Amino acid sequence: MSAAPAEMKENIEANSKWLDAHYDPVANLYTFSSCIALADLQGDGENKLVVGDLGTGACNMKLKVYRGTSLMSENTLLDLPTGLVSFLMDQHEPRTPAVAVASGPFIYVYKNLRPYFKFTLPTLEVNPLEQDVWSQAKEDMIDPVSLKEMLEGIRDKAEIPLSVRSLKFLMLEPQEMEAYVNLHKQNPIRRQTVITCISTLKKNMADEDAVSCLVIGTESKDVYILDPEAFTILSKMSLPSSPTLMDVTGQFDIEFRITVACRNGNIYILRRDSPKPKYCIELTSHPVGLVRVGKNVVVGCAQETLQGYTQKGKKLWTVYLPAPVTTMGLMDHHTRGFQAVLVGLANCEVHLYRDKNLISTIKTPDVVTSVCFGRYGREDGTLIMTTKGGGLMVKILKRTAVFEDKDTAPGPPLAQSIRLNVPKKTKLYVDQTMRERENAVAMHRAFQMDLSRLRLAVARAYVKALESSLTPVSASLSEPLKMHAVVQGLGPSFKLTLNIQNTAVCRPVMNLAVSFLYDESLYSMKTAFFKIPLLVPGLNYPIDTFVECLTDKGISDIIKVFVLREGKSAPLLTAHINMPVSEGLALA
Amino acid sequence: MGLFDKLAGWLGLKKKEVNVLCLGLDNSGKTTIINQLKPSNAQTQDIVPTIGFSIEKFKTSSLSFTVFDMSGQGRYRNLWEHYYKEGQAIIFVIDSSDKLRMVVAKEELDTLLNHPDIKHRRMPILFFANKMDLRDALSSVKVSQMLCLENIKDKPWHICASDAVRGEGLQEGVDWLQDQIKTMRT
């Protein structure tokens, strides 16, 4: 019952923020957040969606451009794209951005959606031993079998790893070796690495439309910064592991900061003028998403957590997520000055976090694999998502949408985190706690002993009261009785009412008498002893008697009431009546 | 109103004044439409995005229109509601080639219709499904479906396809608006 309204409320909540502009579940678009960009490619004031489509992973890799709800153009890519960025290469008018697609060891640069330039990563150093062995093979000085043995020896010992050619050769069956050697022996050996991530860095101006350098991370644990026009390497930095995710901020000529998540589960922060990482964040599990919000870094980890760090690597917070992270993206709404982190989850939800607060949840029909927020078409606050099943989803942030800066996730109430105004500890308090800490065992023992004594005293008093029938309730099986007395009047005459009840189930009680014991100099009673009639079980018998107070000194005493049984010396019940001070005599 | 004014009114010399709001998303063609409706000697050649709003005047056979040409840019849309009270009719312009932002247009229209200054007034609304000349433009029927215009029950409305650059379809819409305003007054 309660689930349905909650769901409805959630829907209304989500609907109040986002408009569903477009959803094509069969867009045939398979990509990740690293291969998606929004750019005004034609300079007509309308941003297009540029996507590096991974296709099936083996074929149909394409560079797709969407305008509005429809596909505008398609270029075939030769290899899987690993990253895609749009950047301004030069100052020429019209200022249309170029698109750089990283794939394998190459960067393909497109201008006006036409191939413009291809950058190839510099080749790596080849093992000299390997070189020697192959040159011997070239002169036919060694046969393929001994070539294999020597290469295996190099593979096991050498610091510089073997080239792809040698590794492939080592995998071959003996009969294929000869042909392979003959085919390749004439060509020089090359060792090449591949690009793992790509980003951009403004060259010398912070403007939105400033010229940007390309920043690439490679499998060979290097980070290169490329000149935007000449595509020469401006700077090279090394990392302890292969980078997988990268975020770049700053300007190349002034100061910059590259935050790189690496395959060894660490995050390194590189800065200008230092070829080695400046700071290192060691994560407890592998990073799957990296977003920088202002000066903080938000990392999505494989352990279903989201963690915030400062740019110097100090941990700020951790949020536990309901499902594994599939993708992450930054939501940066310039016109409203609003920044938040979009986190795509495997349970078909996209969460929006500002710092550690979950401020909105979007439910999606499929698992989201890429998110991108920015200006699309003419709309500033557009959220683009692609799904696991190849769908494309476009949502537009409502003009009236307001994000409350409080956590919508259930948890401890806000009041819990308010600090109480606790006064400072006094010296006495500190001394006392010190004493307690030192003599804990002795104090505990003393307390336990006193407690036992108290219990013993209580038990003794109870037994004594029971034995001498000093209580107004009789527990004996033959005469279970209950009595309470009421005193009425101001004095000197008082009316004393005894309420006697037989609490037995069905047996009446007979032959009872009531006797009063009092100080005869203070009180006088007409009959200090009388008999009680038969007591029917369950009924209340009020018995009235009058007491006269004799003194005028304003003192009072106790009158004891005994319920007696004929032929028995011990009373059945005893009641002590505290008599009030007689006001009548005092007045007279 | 003075005696002379009344006389002039009876004789049809002086036209009745009517205030109209021209609303719609940015780049839908509001200013271009208003520009086309102005007498040819007052038209401007180059249309630039409106900042804030501008007031334009034009005349038809029996009415004198004062149009508040509001800017459609997101950051100026909150200005619209301050002019709802003054308006006696609304022209709502839609870019029928912008399928992506049709939801945004619908959202703005719904906000407009639910505003207390508009909700209980029976003011005519004229929709222009503009940019009909573009290849991927939606038909006016499709536009009215996407905006759920059939749900507007308490106000007279009319949609016409238009091409503001060449001025097609504008006169039909303005004629309808003029008839509506006349019937409202009598």
Image: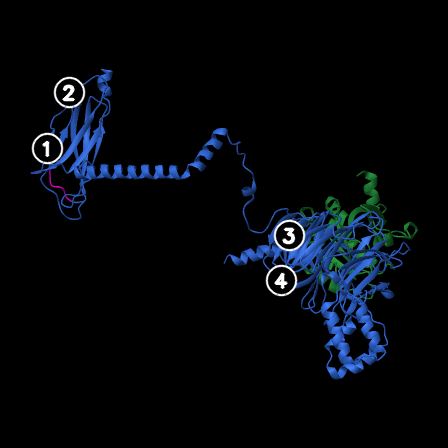
**Considering only order in the chain, which callout, 1 or 2, is on the residue closer to the N terminus?**
2
Viewer-proximal residue, A66 or A236? Answer: A236
- Label disc, if present, on residue A530 of the rendered structure: 1
The residue singled out by tag 4 in the image is A348
Q: Colour of chain A?
A: blue
| SS at mark 3 in the image | strand
Which residue is depicted at the point 60% across and 49% down? A407
- Quadrant in the rendering for residue B176: bottom right
**Considering only order in the chain, which callout, 1 or 3, is on the residue closer to the N terminus?**
3
| SS at mark 4 in the image | loop
Q: Chain of mark 2?
A: A
What kind of residue is marked 3?
A: Gln
Crowding at mark 2 (Cα within 10 Å: few <14, some 14-19, many 20+)? few
Task: Inspect the magenta stretch and tell me whether residue A534 lies in it.
Answer: yes
What kind of residue is marked 1?
A: Phe
**Considering only order in the chain, which callout, 4 or 1, is on the residue closer to the N terminus?**
4
What kind of residue is marked 4?
A: Cys
